[in-house]
Amino acid sequence: MPDSHIFRCGPLMREYSRSVLPIFLLCSVVTLLIIVSALSIGEVVLSVPQTLQLLFQPDDSAQSFILHELRLPRVILALLAGGGLGVAGLIMQTLVRNPLASPDTLGVTTGASVGALLWLSFFSLKYGSSAMPYAAMAGAAVAVSLIFLLSWRSGATPLRLVLTGVGVSALAGAIVTLILVFSPLTTTFSAWIWLSGSVYAASWDKVLQLLGIYLWALPILLVLLRYMKILQLNDSLAIGLGVAIHPRRILLLLACVLLSGGAISLVGAMTFVGLIAPHLARLIIRSGFFSQLLITACCGGCMVIIADLLARTLFLPADLPAGIFVALAGAPLFLWLLIRQRT
Amino acid sequence: MSLLTKNLSISYQQHKVIDSLDLALPAQKISVLIGSNGCGKSTLLKSMARLLIPQSGAVILDGQDIHASNTAQIARKLAILPQSPVAPEGVTVRQLISLGRFPYQNWLRQWSEEDEQQVDKALRLTDTYALQHAAVDALSGGQRQRVWIAMTLAQDTPYLLLDEPTTYLDLAHQIEILELLRELNQQQNKTIIMVLHDLNLACRYADNLVAVHQGRIYAQGTPQDIMSETLVNTVFNLRCKIIDDPFFNTPLCIPFPGALNADAC
């Protein structure tokens, strides 16, 4: 890098690109602006100074309740879920060396859907729906393990992972439809909302639950992120550079399952974020995996916040699932990226 | 310092590609593996670089079984350039070469002065210094191959293994790459082991020629000692005449059309 900068302090040594810091600051500012707008706009419109004042000095007013108990957890849940989905997508795309890889194509989304819908349709009437996130996580874990086992032939090559992922996703999709057909009518409607992905019933409990799941992925990411630049090479090059690829690939995929499975289990099958956020980030920054990861998290978070803002304001008083708008905006964006790349 | 295989056997599914093979390769020399397509020379090279795990037997590097040793430690002794490596999209020459320093890095120490010096040295040795900020995708085939060799040089290993490093290059660039490798052997004392298809270039650049036939070593020695019409007849199933290269005094193989027998190798 012509603008590379080296940081050495005792045993701690890092190399980074000089342009990373301003880009990251800019992205953080944009994200904060989007968060503040999302907090201000809604059925009850607050002015920006009013929002900021209430944010730091809550009072007993109705506006303060709306801000702190309804909008803030909703926006933060959207930010966390979008960020987690984006980061999971970025790691998956790099690991399987395929820009089309995402939690959707590698079975996380459909696996979680099967788990969540099974619980919702057959157990929630009896046991309540508080355990639904765990059912979704279990579904995601089963689907991804199945994909791994089916593609394992003394190691799991990226191409086999993608192909089995598509196969298992199709199978899980069929099971989802089957469950919908046989589920009692009372739960079908909530099932549809869950399947479109929504931060509608956000609460601080859900935010904490999601943070708790992300906390498990954090140590894996901290330790193994430096291997990403090697794992994106061919297997033979990576082995030649002295990296035992399979254990690291498995652990990193596990982190992806925790991030995207956690997000999906709490906000529903929000598709497209994991696919598109990394591509958006690549438009902004190309160098350094860690910087790409931070920008991807910002992009994913902002995508879901904006989609949710549109979903709850455009057709007032209807409050639509945010996932609809992610797909409505995401699909054309993705096509545009593809067309742009060809020219 | 030595690299040798002991009773090495490798099979793909049921088919035995390498059959209880014993081979010792001389240090600080250029060894070239030759043989017909599918005879096992590439498989042999890959297993010597621990890219393939043998069914039985061992590859011994400096007295240690490489499949039982720490892989990062091996990467500081032995570098491999596989056939048709793929660079990540948009990566620059310097970034790619820097990856060669990975075996020396840990979580804290990710870019030491030593790393920097070795990358600079690799850029200079391969004459790619001027290209260091160019994207690898934008380079010509010959330049790209020099960049890949630079990456293995940044690994700073006494052993360098290359799987068909001249494939897809025109003759001028083939000579350029082979001259570079000879220079590295003579000036940096690297032990070079590679697979080549061109018999005449193999004879010109090899100190030690290894002919692989049906998963076994057919002959090993200097090109002058082992190159013969019988060897080419058997190993390649090809009729030929061996003459002396008038300029380099190495054996020169003139091939004739027509196979000797239909079912060899």
Image: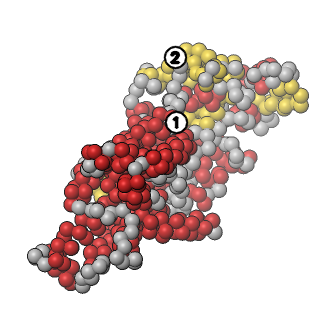
Residue B210 seen in the current view: no
Residue type, mark 2 in image = Gly
Residue B199 placement, left or right of A311: right
Residue type, mark 1 in image = Ser
Image coloring type: secondary structure
Q: Position of residue B121 (x, y in %)?
A: 47, 50
Q: Which residue is mark 2?
A: B57
Q: Position of residue B215 (x, y in %)?
A: 66, 20
Q: Position of residue A302 (x, y in %)?
A: 36, 68
Name above or below for residue A298 compared with residue B228.
Answer: below
**Callout 1: 10 Å neighbours few (<14), some, many (20+)?**
many
A218 or B152, nearer to the observer = A218
At numbered mark 2, what does the secondary structure look like: helix, strand or loop? strand
Q: Position of residue A123 (x, y in %)?
A: 32, 44
**Callout 2: 10 Å neighbours few (<14), some, many (20+)?**
some
Instruction: Assign the N terminus of chain A to one quadrant of the image.
Output: bottom left
A155 or A330, nearer to the observer = A330
Name above or below for residue B64 compared with residue A76.
Answer: above
At numbered mark 1, what does the secondary structure look like: helix, strand or loop? helix
Which quarter of the figure has residue A243?
top left
Residue at horizontal 88 percent and vertical 30 percent from the top: B256
Q: Which residue is mark 1?
A: A151
Which quarter of the figure has residue B12?
top right
Residue B257 placement, left or right of B40: right
Residue at horizontal 39 percent and vertical 66 percent from the top: A322
Residue at horizontal 48 percent and vertical 39 percent from the top: A147
Instruction: Determine contact: label 1, label 2, CB under 8 Å.
Output: no
